[in-house]
Amino acid sequence: MVLYRLSDVKPGYPIGQFNVLEVYPEGRGGMARVVRAAHKAERDSEVALKISRVGGPNQQFFFAAIQKEVEILQKLDHQGVVRLERVSGGKNPFKERAVEIEGSPWFFGMECLRGGSLEGYIRTLGPLGLDESAAICHRLGITLAYIHKQGFAHNDVKPDNVLFRSPLKVGGSFDPVLIDFGVAAKLIKHQLDGSVVYMAPERLQEARDPSPPEVVQQYDPAKADVWSMGILFYRLIVGREPFLGVTDRSITSAILRAMPVPLSQDRRDIPAELDEYIIDGCLSKDPDLRVSIEQFNRVIKYYAGDRRVRRVPKKRKRFSWLP
């Protein structure tokens, strides 16, 4: 059998019981790559395969993170959490080694989510209406509340990690699904996992000034998720995050020291009480003063309206002579 490198994976290549149909651009970074694949024996059965990175000093961490992510997803059963799919007939049917790839990385299967990412949605449409933003955040907040009750925190809530289960239609409902629980599996203490621009100040501070090994983690991961939800809501309303910079270091400095500009400075339709709630309640630098996800859900639900999709990206016109 001729082995190929993970970086060379492309449609038609085999991975376990599957053949690759598409390599997702979103899967090129971080700890893994993601592809859409079809079962060799059941071509109508499509899954998304997440394949661990191979090589380098962090290879064992990447392998362990993939396996830990599977363990977490096996314990979660919620419509707002991506669902595992079987990929093996082994002891754990949800994970397997890709022996066709150099280094035999671990991979696991997930349902195919066909509605695109929240990042793509807002990049195309720009800032959303208050009711649309609240509807999306309320659905995500309900999912996070469930995850927290199961004893986990996501730790990397951002638009790239939110996919819609099916293509959005005007008048339909938002059905956001959280993906990428690799950071929820914090296997290396104090490692700065996740996206800095959505990261809570206590997580950044902990990474910069780690506690001694005998000291228990100082921050509440659930409150860190609330911070990320505040950043996400701000992005949906304004079209940018409240703390920006050229480098991770400058972004970190802004998060730790700067105060966010009120939402109402860019959007006059934002009620003053909601503006204050997001800035002081969700984005408080002191996690003890930050609201809980349950409190966030109760407030944001009030502004969600009928929870219907108002706009969808226009489909690009294709000339008849193009394939």
Image: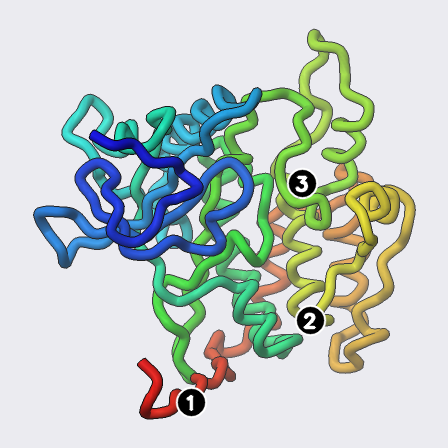
Task: Give the image's coloring scheme.
Answer: rainbow
Mark seen at residue 317: 1
Identify which residue is drawn at 26% across, 51% down.
37
Judge from the rendering whether residue 307 lies leftward or rightward of residue 38; answer left or right. right
The amino acid pointed to by label 3 is Ala
Q: Where residue 181 sits in the image (x, y, percent)?
A: 48, 39
When the figure is inspected, residue 3 is found, relative to residue 124, above or below; the finding is: above
| Mark 3 vs mark 2, CA separation in Å | 20 Å
| Mark 1 vs mark 2, CA separation in Å | 29 Å
Residue 43 vs residue 141, the one in the foreground: 43
Mark seen at residue 224: 3
Which quadrant of the structure image shows residue 18?
top left
Identify the mark nearer the N-term, 3 or 2: 3
The amino acid pointed to by label 2 is Ile
Q: Residue furthest bottom?
A: 320
Of discs 1 and 3, which sits in the foreground?
1
Classify mark 1: residues with Cα within 10 Å, few (<14), some (14-19) or many (20+).
Answer: few
Identify the mark nearer the N-term, 1 or 2: 2
Residue 127 vs residue 29, the one in the foreground: 29
